[in-house]
Amino acid sequence: MLDLVIIGLNHKTAPIDIREKLAFPEKEIEKALTEAHSLPSVKETMILSTCNRVEIYAISQEVETSIQQLKDFLSRYHHLTLNLLEKYLYVYTGEQAVKHIFRVASSLDSMVLGEPQILGQIKAAYTLSAETKTSGFILHRLLHRAFSVAKRVRTETQIGDNAVSVSSVAVELAEKIFGNLDQRTVLLIGAGEMSELAARHLLSAGVQKIWVTNRSFDRALSLASEFHGEAIPFEDLYRGLKKVDIVISATDSPHYLIEKERMVKVMKERKQKPLFFIDIADPRDIAPEVGDLENIYLYNLDDLQKVANENRKGREQEAQKAEVIVEEEVAKFVRWYKSLEITPTIIALKKKCEEIRKKELEKLLSLYPHLSEKERRSLEAMTSAIVNKILHDPFVRLKQKDEEALSDIYVDALRTLFQLPETVSTEEQEEG
Amino acid sequence: MINIYFFKLASFLYCLATLSYSAYIFFLKEGLSKVATRLVTLGFAFHTLAFLTRLIEAGYTPVTNLHESLSFFAWMIIGILLIANLKYKIKVLGAFLTSIALIFMIFAFALPKEILPLAPVLRSVWHPFHVLFAFLGNAIFTLAFCCGVIYLIQEHQLKKKKMGAIVKRLPSLKVLDDLNYQALKFGFPLLTLGIITGAVWAEYAWGRYWGWDPKETWSLITWFLYAAMLHQRLTVGWRGRKAAIMAIVGFMSVLFTFLGVNLILPGLHTYSQWEP
């Protein structure tokens, strides 16, 4: 019986420098896949390499051997000693491995719980392995299952619903105020990692234009070119406030830059068009009273952080629901997987044919009660012979050990075509 | 009395739609809102049948007593909801408007439903036009009222920095304010037309255009409120919160003009002679 093996590391088990060393550059994955696939114990394989995790999935006949061979492969490929690698690697097999894949795809194992990118990354990894034909029947089935588990988790829980980073909270707020952002403009005051990140998020959410101002006009110019925006002199700050919709402020000014009295005037000149202030500076740039004005929405870094934290807690709760779904799906997959064993399938098919034969024979015999014992026995023998002869060739084919990879497909087909139940009793498993 | 049968069916469907919209707001399952939209559309179809069958049975436009007027108002509200649904996908609005329509239907149901011979003053070609314009305007103002209420809730949440379940369920402030303005732009001319056709009809019925009867006075007050709203919006940018509050105040005035005047203040529009 083939088994699933996962070897890998992620943000929880390895520091970033190790993860970077072990990552497969996009261009090399194809080559690495072929190399891993050529390992004698590996039947199917797939490589997932993102900035937070590197994992090799393999279907193998000899689990222990393949674990060793895959570890050797990783150490050889990345020129790292096995001893060093061992410290960071985790290994999952069988049911645990299935669970791991489902959890990864559903973003339950991600650094940011419920983030959506991972599913796309797995899909890409799978597509590549399918194109290079290093993944086969079992990985196909497993990955398609994983995708639908991820979809179930997305629709049945709210794990990905609320923003958990400061910038995405800012975008969500902007959308609640302005609706569609594509006609909106942003004014970026000052510079800083967080404010630039927020501006970038707003841009990718569709904001039309970004204006930049800074005490140093050169700095403003260079930032503006980065955002394909426009720079305005710092003295024109209030003129800028008249025309934009969203303001991100992050200067190191020791006192408030924007005061209530002036904003009252600005709002009048804007004809009360709503204005969304994001104050990322410490100490603050915008006087808190500004937020009391009508049609002005003022959020500072702490406010955004608080929302993000609350949402994160919400996601953790949703994750518990998701784990239940994953457990359910793992059990389903394992049931299917176990049904691929040859012996129980043969037994089940034999049983089904035998039942049909007996039933039909009984029907016939009840129509002809006058048949002699000898005639009855001949009929019995004849029908048994038919069943056995029909089943003989497929069974011989199934039992050919060297064709094990193919036999999975045959078994699955047999189960589907003859509608054999997936449940396998433990007794039968032991025989297999 | 087949019109009553259709009327009941429509009420029942509005009731189911209200439940379905509420369930959608609670569980946020897309399927529920689709079901609600279908129910409300079907309800509207039966309501239309109720109106048409009553029109045939009575032989005149059946908007002559409180039962008929309430039902007509509800019919227009649902019609406006269906139109608004085409452009703005705001499901919360569905919950609000269907429940208001449902309340009107329940009141209408409780009132005497008999078809009586048409009073002589109502026998005018202007009457149906007056009623149509007035109620279409009222229905649009009902929409503006709902937008106003939702706006105030949403604005409060955003100002108080509560980004919770409520914010998530309610639409953006911009959409609500836009819709409020759209409603004003369409509602105000209709109200104006309603008053003008009413005056022309009054000239036929009573021989004068305007007589400061309570209904006339109150509709003029309503007209001034909405005119002020439109003016302030265009000149000094009364939008958002102020516009939302005005939409609510305006609707109160609409309701009083429609119901309060009929029930409290005596006058030509009270039609009390047809009520027991």
Image (cartoon, rainbow, N blue to C red):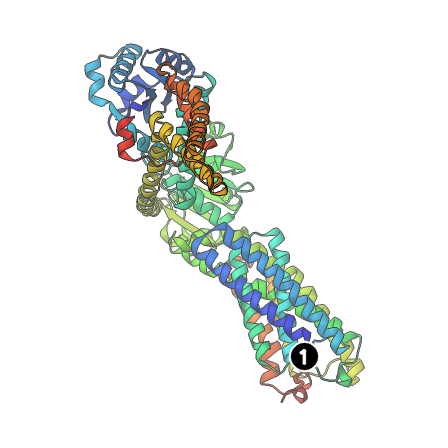
Q: Position of residue B41 (x, y in %)?
A: 62, 59
Using the image, name the chain to which the residue with label 1 belongs: B
Rendered residue at 80%/81% (across/down):
B204
User: Eyeballing the image, is B253 above or below A268?
Assistant: below
Residue A84 left/right relative to A191: left
User: Eyeballing the image, is A146 above or below B57?
Assistant: above
Residue B196 visible, this orientation: no
Q: Position of residue B220 (x, y in %)?
A: 66, 75
User: Eyeballing the image, is B190 above or below B31?
Assistant: below
Rendered residue at 71%/74% (across/down):
B54
Q: Position of residue A159 (x, y in %)?
A: 37, 43
User: Eyeballing the image, is A45 above or below A98?
Assistant: above
Q: Quadrant of the C terminus of chain B?
A: bottom right
Residue B60 visible, this orientation: yes
Callout 1 environment at 10 Å: few (<14), some (14 to 19), or many (20+)?
A: many
Q: Dot 1: what SS?
A: helix
Q: Nearer the viewer, residue A52 or A194?
A: A52
Q: Nearer the viewer, residue B190 or A87?
A: A87
Amino acid under label 1?
A: Glu
Q: Quadrant of the N terminus of chain B?
A: bottom right
Q: Nearer the viewer, residue A298 or A387?
A: A387
Residue A381 left/right relative to B86: left
